[in-house]
Image: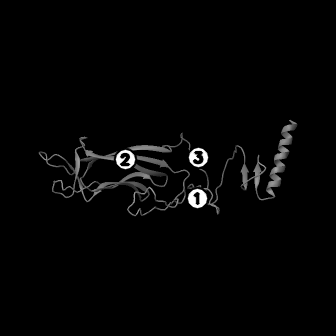
Amino acid sequence: MKRKIYITIIMCLGIFLNAQKGKVGVNTANPTETLDVNGKTYTNSLYLRNPGEPTMTGGSFLATSQNALQLYDPALESSGLFNYLKLTLTGVPGTGITDYDTKIDATNFLVILHNYSFKLNDGNTSVMLDYGDNGVNDNKQGSPDVVAFKSNGTWHIRARFTDSRMIATNTSTPSRTYNNFTVDLYLMAYRRLIEKQNINDINDDLGGNDGSTKTINKPSGF
């Protein structure tokens, strides 16, 4: 019992002495921050001032939608931290999908489109690209334009090919089909809890090289 009392007294003295230097240490004689706790902590509430802003010395980024750490409770949430979705759209025209609203909230989720496939509605994968509308292979390959983007507060999908159309490869009856395709989209929806917001886009010129010797500055927030 006496030993516990001595330890408590020593800790209190350490806190008092360190506090005079502008830094408080718990279970440490040499605190490196304003409050340095060497051990487990317990609190009912934690307030974050200016979340998402780095310190003057380049400290850690910590951001939430509120000035607090958000508690994730699986029993109360209808979705998880990491959600995998397969979105299948049928009856897609040959021009593809320009703007499909997934209705997924862009404020609370980050959506990543990590894979996709184009096929006929009957499951046939005999699909090719046609530069024009003449039903003839013009030997011109369109560039894929398949992305998830934010619009009016929700995540939207664009899945098409620039300067070309999707067509069925059969040349006999029935004729080539331009409006009966299936697009499978594989999405990951991450729930926003703690993350840096509004990181700028990155653009870099490789100058015709393969990029193996290219060095760029570290992206902001990483």
**Residue at image location 82% in from the left, 48% down from the top:** 12
Instruction: Please state which amino acid type lies under the numbered disc 1.
Output: Gly
- The answer to whether 66 appears left or right of 146 in the picture is right
Q: Quadrant of the N terminus?
A: top right
Return the residue found at the far top.
1
- Which numbered mark, 3 or 2, is in the foreground of this view? 2
Residue 185: x %, y % from top left: 35, 47
- Which residue carries the number 2 mark? 115
- Which residue carries the number 3 mark? 71
Quadrant of res 19: bottom right
The one nearer the camera, 88 or 56, is: 56
Q: Eyeballing the image, is 151 above or below 188?
A: below
The one nearer the camera, 126 or 151, is: 126
Residue 126: x %, y % from top left: 22, 44
Callout 3 environment at 10 Å: few (<14), some (14 to 19), or many (20+)?
few
Residue 74: x %, y % from top left: 53, 40
Instruction: Please state which amino acid type lies under the numbered disc 3.
Output: Leu
